[in-house]
Amino acid sequence: MSDLSHAGLVVPVEPTDHLQGSEHARVTLVEYGDFECPSCKLAAATPRLLMERYPNRIRFVFRHFPLEEAHPHALLAAEAAEAAAAQGSFWPMHDLLFENQEHLNSRDLQRYAAELGLDTVRYHAEMDDHIYLQKVREHIAGGRRSHIRATPAFFVNGAVQDISFGMKALHDAVAAVFAQAG
């Protein structure tokens, strides 16, 4: 990531975002991620761990930021996640994509859709028509406006978190919010 010391989350959390946790949580954790990014795969457990440590006190939001130049399957994987979301299966697809990060071609994505029990006729039609591409592009644009250059990128309550030296920084940032609250 470039100098993000003055960066903040530009696009507020919206009802159309993919989220877990309570809307009344004290901490909102937003990640811009790429399903083909090895660092994102390593970071994927962190939001889950934080939500377990602080039950009902963290809301986690995932947004797409596929780095197409470096990861040729990331954009299609993001579209597949959106197609799964349209059928109520974003988070299971999210997890499958990270678990199978080395296998994200079109045929693999179709197999994951079937494994999740999605309506595969609908899935194929939506993927063929790229009907979720615009939503993915909107996430990318929002990330760029928030000065994201690399993934994963995390925001805690709208403030960017520098995780270049590890995920402990994210844990510390969340703990600090709770410590300030008393």
Image (spheres, helix red, strand yellow):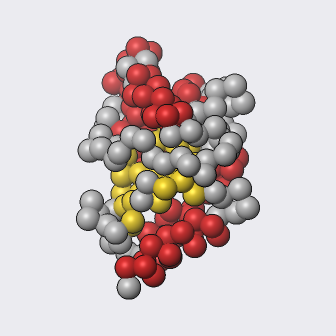
How many numbered marks appear?
A: 0
Q: Residue furthest bottom?
A: 182
Q: Position of residue 39 (x, y in %)?
A: 69, 50
Q: Residue furthest front?
A: 6
Q: Residue at x 64, y 69 (%)?
A: 168
Q: Residue at x 45, y 34 (%)?
A: 142
Question: Where 72 sits versus 57, above or below?
Answer: above
Q: Residue at x 63, y 44 (%)?
A: 151
Residue 92 visible in the displayed image: no
Question: Where 176 sits versus 83, above or below?
Answer: below
**Quadrant assignment, res 26:** bottom left
Q: Position of residue 147 (x, y in %)?
A: 56, 39
Query: Which quadrant, please, contains the N terminus?
Result: top right
Q: Position of residue 79 (x, y in %)?
A: 47, 29
On the rendered structure, is 31 left or right of 24? right
**Which of the two residues, 8 or 37, is positioned nearer the viewer here?**
8
Question: Where 105 sits versus 54, above or below?
Answer: above
Residue 54 visible in the displayed image: yes
**Which of the two residues, 38 or 95, is positioned nearer the viewer here?**
38
Question: Where 9 sits versus 175, above or below?
Answer: above
Q: Position of residue 119 (x, y in %)?
A: 34, 31
Query: Which quadrant, please, contains the C terminus?
Result: bottom left
